[in-house]
Image: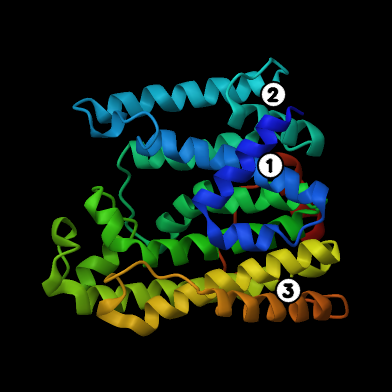
Amino acid sequence: MNQAVVDHAAQTIQAGSKSFATAARLFDPDTRRSAVMLYAWCRHCDDVIDGQTLGFASSPGAQQNGERRLDELRELTRRAYAGEPMAEPAFAAFQDVVQRHAIPERYPLEHLEGFAMDVRGTRYETLDDTLRYCYGVAGVVGIMMARIMGADEEATLDRACDLGLAFQLTNIARDIVEDAAMGRCYLPAQWLREAGIPEHSLAAAEYRPALAHLAARLVESAEPYYRSARGGLGALPLRSAWAIATAHGVYRQIGMKVKARGPHAWDGRVSTGKGEKLRLLARGAAMALSSRRETPAPRPPTLWQRPLSPAARHGARAAGA
């Protein structure tokens, strides 16, 4: 692998997510390398769709351009799986990762389908609809990260997906006003109607108290997924479990802050400081160690279930027989 590609991926994660960058330092070198390179591909696709690298989203034909760029991303993804040379650093990194860890092609394509929901301006009527979006943009990333860490059992992948869902619910709560400025709303329309908030006026100051209530509801909705995700730590190598437990703590803390700030949650971007991260690193170590001797509780059947491959569905039916 070209060192320039590896360096590009490392720079991408430092610029794009300080929270994940903190946790990624805890991986062993090989796992960290692959995790960071997968992150670089995810970030690249997200930036392209949002127009942050090519600028198409602010042009008159934004949706048409978005569909075109999605098609290009899908085509590059298929070419990467076909083993063709990749000139784009993010796709060169991606190709190395999926080949090295035998990540099925369906997962990155499902990730791109999550972005397609943004391009199409999908509306989310229920929480399950929102969770379907969360799966595409984050849950499936959790699955791919778990594969990088050596996990391939469906039960463990379910827990990894749950952590991605929890992360994204937290992100949505934190970014409600910022997303609204881009014309996007991931809150269930049912909730908005119940709260008396017009979707077109989501960010208006007069609705901040009601919006804070819905943000708190999102944060609370993430909690069972955070709890479920803990049950997958024992299936990971210890250093990977430490990294994931730390990320678990950092993102969950962001959600708790959003909830605690109420109507002021969007006065500035909610994040965790250096001192908090150090405490969460220590707490993550304790969580990872305790996972070595715990028997996880069964995954609650009430949680949203990710789409399964035909083989996995067959296995699930056989297990339940």
Which residue is under mark 3? 298
Residue 232 is at least partly visible in this image: no
Answer left or right for 282 relative to 30.
left
- Residue 78 percent location from the top left of the image: 62, 22
Q: Earlier in the sequence, mark 3 or mark 1?
A: 3
**Badge 1 element:** loop
- Please give the label number shown on residue 309: 1
Q: Between 41 and 317, which is closer to the camera in this rendering?
A: 41
**Badge 2 element:** helix
The residues tagged by marks 3 and 1 sit, at their Cα atoms, a distance apart of 21 Å
- Above or below 283: residue 320: above
- Residue 195 percent location from the top left of the image: 21, 74
- Please give the label number shown on residue 199: none
Q: Quadrant of the N terminus?
A: top right
Residue 280 is at least partly visible in this image: yes
The residues tagged by marks 2 and 1 sit, at their Cα atoms, a distance apart of 19 Å
Q: Earlier in the sequence, mark 2 or mark 1?
A: 2
The residues tagged by marks 3 and 2 sit, at their Cα atoms, a distance apart of 35 Å
Q: Between 88 and 308, which is closer to the camera in this rendering?
A: 88
Report the residue that reaches farthest toward the bottom: 260
Which residue is under mark 2? 81
Residue found at x 31% / y 69% = 268
- Residue 265 percent location from the top left of the image: 31, 75
Kind of residue sitting beneath label 3: Pro
